[in-house]
Amino acid sequence: MNRWIMLGLVTILSVEVFGFVFLQGDGYACPGCNGTKEVWREGFPFMEIPGQWETCPRCQGTGWCWMYSLQGATAVSFLACLLCFLAVFSLAYAIDGLRADMNPYVYEVENMDWPFNPMYSTWLFVKDRRKWTFYYTVTTLLGQFWAEWLFPFC
């Protein structure tokens, strides 16, 4: 079972890397300033306010715009979320393994209440790895959705 999950993750990762590398768009000269980095802002001659050169607001004065394809942007964001998930999951695995080694009594406990016991995840890690995997997968994904809602990328 674990081999199939790992194969699925590697396949998704490969598809996303392919999308990022081969489907990414190219850069082009800014259409707002034609690559000159400045635009002319008209004044108001009837009020005796002359026109002036300003930094191009479209390219922020670089003269160059990058256009990423939808596939490339999707691949990058999915890859970042996948890497964050794997990092958090691996860290939880290491922490619960360490806590189980430091607290041998968790091997003797037969039943434990979930919401209020701080050793629940370690106990679950020792007693049933499948439930532990499900528990951390759900909590990590919910945490990522919450973080994206709280701190949006855009």
Image: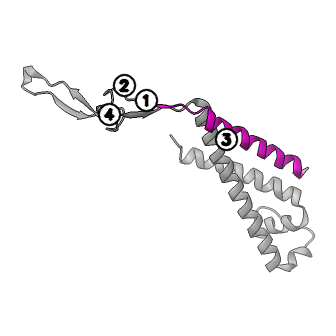
Indicate the secondary structure of the residue bearing disc 2. loop
**Where does label 2 land, which residue?**
31
Task: Choose the circle earlier in sequence order: 3 or 4.
Answer: 3
> What's the residue type where badge 1 is placed?
Tyr
Indicate the secondary structure of the residue bearing disc 4. loop
Q: Which dot marks residue 28?
A: 1
> What's the residue type where badge 4 is placed?
Pro
Dots 2 and 1: beta carbons under 8 Å? yes
Indicate the secondary structure of the residue bearing disc 3. helix
Q: Report the mark closest to the observer, 2 or 1.
A: 1
Task: Choose the circle earlier in sequence order: 3 or 2.
Answer: 3
**Range of residues picked out in magenta:** 2-27
> Alpha-carbon neighbours of circle 1 within 10 Å: few (<14), some, or many (≥20)?
few
Using the rendered view, name the quadrant where residue 62 is placed: top left
**Where does label 3 land, which residue?**
17
Q: Which dot marks residue 57?
A: 4
